[in-house]
Image (cartoon, rainbow, N blue to C red):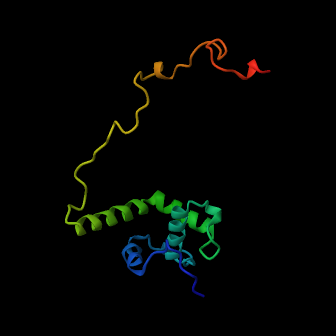
Amino acid sequence: MARTPYPTDLTDQQWWLIEPMLPRPKPGGRPRSVDLREVLNAVLYLLRSGCSWRLIPHDLPRWPTVRHYYDAWRRDGTWSRVHDALRAQVRVAAGRAPTPSAVIIDSQSVKTTEKGGRVGSTRPSGSRAASGRWSWTRWG
């Protein structure tokens, strides 16, 4: 029975790009009983919705199965290979080199304090009452 697609589901064209990059079943092992496209659809749903693993909808593969494939693909580098291949395709389509040639890191994006170090995070000494600030203890 076909399910109603989610907005995060892979299109046929997206699936045809990604499917050849996924690991093949191990020879001699038990035949794969889960549809990898549905596993990817579940991962995309999880990432886009921000839900927890256990809240993946019931019409997608069971969450332990999805988590198993997610972790296995992270360990064996599948996610990195898919990312790198898709990035290269997008860059070539845009008329750029397949791999980036420069990286920009902005050290000014987060300012902490002008003092820096421990001096910038040292707590003031004395009590709030002694420093002239209002305190709940004045009313109690």
Query: Residue lying furthest right in this view?
Result: 140
Please say whether residue 28 is visible from this viewpoint: no
What residue is rendered at 62% in x and 77% in y? 59
Q: Residue at x 65, y 63 (%)?
A: 54
Q: Position of residue 87 (x, y in %)?
A: 32, 63
Q: Quadrant of the C terminus?
A: top right
Q: Nearer the viewer, residue 131 or 79?
A: 131
Q: Considering only vertical position in the picture, is 123 above or below 67?
A: above
Residue 49: image location, x then y, percent: 55, 63
Residue at x-position 28% and y-position 64%: 88
Q: Position of residue 11 (x, y in %)?
A: 43, 78
Residue 12 placed where, x, y %?
Answer: 42, 81
Q: Quadrant of residue 108?
A: top left
> Residue shown at 57%/78% (left/top)?
33
Residue in front for this viewpoint, 138 or 30: 138
Q: Is residue 96 above or below residue 12?
A: above
